[in-house]
Image (cartoon, rainbow, N blue to C red):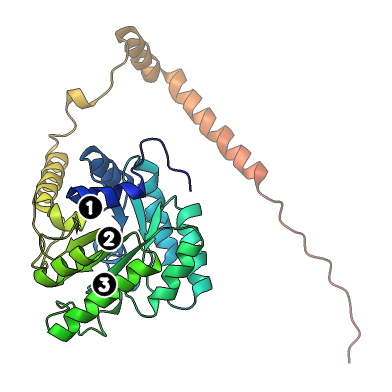
Amino acid sequence: MSVPQGKLALPKLAEMKQRGERIVMVTAYDAPGARFAEDAGIDIILVGDTAAMVVLGHEGTTVPVTMDEMIFLTRTVARAAKRPIVIGDMPFGSYQVSDEAAVENAIRFVKEAGADAVKLEGAGPSLPRVQAIVGAGIPVMGHVGLTPQSATMLGGFKTQGKTAEAALRLVDEARALEAAGCFAVVLEAVPAPVAAVITETLSVPTIGIGAGPECDGQVLVYHDLLGLSEGHLPRFVKRYANLSREIRDALEHYADDVRSGAFPQEQHTYEMPAEELEAFERASRSPSTSSASAQARNASSSTTKAQLPAPRSEPPLRKTSSP
């Protein structure tokens, strides 16, 4: 896969880990969000399946989002993001069925959406999927800990790895994903000491979300960090703005201005040369203008009628013999 000019190359992420330079990842779902991330110097943009909740209106689950929806969203992000690595999040059902289906859908992310890589959740059954996709030449980011697509099996959106046994299992899963070919691994809702051990163990970068400060990078959902999400938020979210309030205030102000006549004002309108305005007003007041307008309307009506198909004539009735 060719790397566009200025595009952050995937091997640079491993170099950043070695230098101790933190990797910054954020989700985005449209071209404006991608441009903001680009301007802010974000390293990785994840077009996450969280779009199901923050964009598409599904409550408390990422499962309903489809491949076609994810392709559309990823395409808009990839079109606007020049330097950041764009990762398409493989939705539920797009890779679980078979290696072949996983590869086909990963190819769609690259060919149709312009993604640089894909992400999928879990280890275990996902390991052969990772190997197959990487074998097809497409980079894969892994994801262990809280995996939202299988949250029901995990007992809900809960911290993972809180017992010694569960924590050791997470370490093994992360190692297995690296061995399968993942270039990075997301650690979600994992106790900080466990994430620190995984980060130290792996040679590929770890990206934390609710996994403490020792990860090689961090990721947050765009809508969460900007204050666009409302209601209960996970403990790991830090809000850097409260845009939902600002947006609501702006819309209310706009509605008030329209209803009161305060908008639009003179600076919001267009003018025409004084002599042209005078000629227009003189012509619009003359009887001939009204007559011409009426003639134009009649001509339009006649044209419309002429274009209508002629009514079909019924065939003549034939006299039939009585039974």
Horizontally, residue 134 falls left or right of residue 152, namely right
The label shown at residue 144 is 3
CA separation in Å, label 3 and label 2: 16 Å
Q: Residue at x 36, y 36 (%)?
A: 6
State the residue lying farthest toward the top.
275
Report the amino acid beneath label 1.
Answer: Lys
Which residue occupies the foreground of this view, 193 or 148? Answer: 193
Position in image of residue 4 (x %, y %): 42, 39
Say which mark, if any, is on residue 17. Answer: 1
Instruction: Mark 1 or mark 3: name the one nearer the start of the chain.
Output: 1
Name the amino acid type tagged 3: Val
Quadrant of residue 70 within the rendered picture: bottom left
Query: Which quadrant is the C terminus positioned in?
Result: bottom right
Between 120 and 205, the one nearer to me in the picture: 205
| Callout 1 secondary element | helix
Q: Are marks 1 and 2 in contact (CB under 8 Å)?
A: yes
Q: Residue 57 at what x, y percent from top left? A: 27, 65
- N-terminal-most mark, 3 or 2: 3
Residue 300, given in percent of the width and then of the height, sits at 56, 36
Write the residue at 23% across / 45% down.
42
Residue 49 screen position, x and y as percent? 31, 64
Q: N-terminal of the two: label 1 or label 2?
A: 1
At mark 3, the secondary structure is strand
Task: Examine the rendering and report whether any part of residue 302 can be seen.
Answer: yes
> What is the number of the mark on residue 311?
none
**Nearer to us in this view, 239 or 83:** 83
Q: Which residue is mark 2?
A: 203
